[in-house]
Image (cartoon, rainbow, N blue to C red):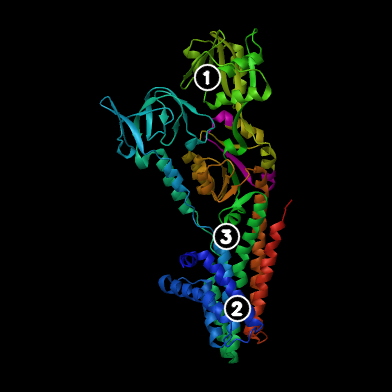
Amino acid sequence: MEKVKNFFKDEEKRVILFMLLSGISLVVSFFDIGKLPLDAAWISIILCGIPIVKEAIMGLVTRFDIKADLLVSIALVASIIINQIFAAGEVAFIMTIGAFLEERTVSKARAGIEKLVHLTPQVARVVRNGTEQIIPASKVQIGDIIRVLAGEIVAVDGIIISGKTSIDQSVMTGESLPVDKETGDQVFSGTLNQFGTFDMKAVKLGEDSSLQRMIKLVRSADASKAKIVGVADRWATWIVAGALSAAILTWFATGEIIRSVTILVVFCPCALVLATPTAIMAGIGNATKYGILIREGDALERLANIQRISFDKTGTLTYGQLSVTTVESFNPSISKEKLLQLTASAEIRSEHPLGKAIIEHIRNISNVSINEPDEFKVIAGRGVQAEIVNHSILVGNIEMMADNNISIPEQMEEKTSRYKDDGCTIMYISINGNASGFIALSDTLREDAVDMIKNIERNEVKSILLTGDNNQAACHIAKLVGIDDVCSNCLPEDKISAIEKYQNKNEPVCMVGDGVNDALALKKAYVGIAMGGIGSDIAIDAADIALIRDDIKCIPHLLSLAKKVTKTIKLNLTFSMTLNFIAVVLAVLGVLGPVVGALVHNAGSVLVILNSSLLLNWKGR
């Protein structure tokens, strides 16, 4: 019994059951199967018709909201009055199918924003009067000194007053590398302290913190993205007025009420209701074959109108995985291979992504052994220090070399500057107090990125690069893929500002991203596309569309498909309105009766569905 109750509480399952029973009842009614004492079409009227009439009356009385349901309700009641039961049941059935398809394709707002809330730390380690204590993050006050240990999440926005570290702030900027921080640098709530311990002064709390502002902006951006209203409902007032006027005038002119009821039946916008959702569902089915998940029903309609498409860099145009670009030795007695081996030995105990990338690189290209260091030390925000077989090795950034009074030869500086211009990260290597070489690392460009951008341009859509990475890295990637419009060093607020700038000029923007920091931009953009394979759950929940396999080369097909779906919808609408007009004329002349009229506009609905189904196997150019 409990399962039955739960079944009927599930609205979708209940509607499917009602439609199934209604369809069967209409077949029984049309062919008069079983010689029943009561017309079987009453089942369709009760299960599908009553909800339509109820919704129409409630909308009219409480909000004076005139929708297509009102005309359907009038046609239903009129058909029943003149004992055209099958016609009434058939209209109710078709309209319920249309409403169901529309409900399935036009999704409600997702609840992924709650995942952002979970990133907010619940406690903070506060130092007051020289005593360290753990208190609820909500109790932190501006000016409090907060101590953040390695592996902890920063509770509030603040300024570092002592200590050095590396912060993973991908939640805010999407940067692939941890950012080195020291005294005077700003840190954001929700970011992860990876290595060193530092003390910071609380500057922004609660709703004013970076993470909470992002949560608030995502919510407001989601609310501002209006849904597209169905064509039948948009024109409902005129459809209802036209149908009633035609029916009344025909009744007065001919004195035959059956003609008026036929007009009401054929005027019902069944094909009009089905025109949009069937095309969208077929488009969704087509996209699924290419590993594209359409999460918002009207996303394809909106996508057809975009003029610009903006990309995040890390994890979208690139793989988001660091790899070694080059190894350069400036010590005549040490080969590149030996330099790489010593560096890998120094980094073998490191948890830093740069160190891991070096270890992975040497294991992929060589079988040489990596020795365990005799001594090992992580210098937060700088690099690592190690003793390996009588070699004193330093591996880190330029600041680490300066801290240890190690001068960089002019020739090395010239060569590293070229790699920096290409967006590479440089790891300097000192052996026994002398600058001996460097290793350049960079993110890896996706193989399909260049062709994808070219194909997007063929769809007359311009590309933009919005990234939290530094300007050199951003411009290098943009140049490689062929994007001219670049915005670097972007926080989430900067990305939304860039999108708003274009959309305020009536240039709808599609955003493609993968990280938590992209959630805001994905929501604010006219259409949001998330990388489903490596993308964060929050980014996927914020997007209208997800690329399940992270296959960016399918984006041009998606743009072409969106335009094809829009053309199909327009064709469906033109056909359905033309058929309705012809049917009304024939009803006025008395050529069509209620039952034949219902079958005619039912045939129109079938043709609309068949035309939409052609999208399922559409391949484009």
* Marking on residue 12: none
Q: Residue furthest bottom?
A: 255
Residue at x-position 54% and y-position 80%: 76
Q: Which residue is mark 1?
A: 397
In the image, is residue 108 above or below residue 272? above
Tell me if mark 2 has few (under 14), some (14-19) or many (20+) residues whose alpha carbon lies within 10 angstroms of its own: many
User: The disc labelled 2 sits on which kind of residue?
Assistant: Ser
Of labels 1 and 2, the one closer to you: 2
Residue 461 in the image: x percent, y percent? 64, 47
In the image, is residue 405 above or below residue 281? above
Q: Residue furthest left?
A: 129
Q: Are marks 3 and 2 in contact (CB under 8 Å)?
A: no
Q: Choose top left, top right, bottom left or bottom right for residue 128.
A: top left
Residue at x-position 36% and y-position 39%: 122
Q: Could one spot residue 392 in this view of the protein?
A: yes
Q: Choose top left, top right, bottom left or bottom right for residue 575.
A: bottom right
* Marking on residue 105: 3
Q: Residue furthest front?
A: 1
Which circle's residue, 1 or 2, is located before the other in the chain? 2
In the image, is residue 452 above or below residue 177? below
Tell me if mark 3 has few (under 14), some (14-19) or many (20+) residues whose alpha carbon lies within 10 angstroms of its own: many
Under tag 2, what secondary structure? helix
- Extent of the magenta region: 455-473
In this view, the residue in front, 18 or 204, is 18
Of labels 3 and 2, the one closer to you: 2
* Marking on residue 25: 2
Residue 357 in the image: x percent, y percent? 59, 26
Which circle's residue, 3 or 2, is located before the other in the chain? 2
Q: Is residue 16 magenta?
A: no
- Alpha-carbon span between mark 3 and mark 2: 27 Å
User: The disc labelled 1 sits on which kind of residue?
Assistant: Asn
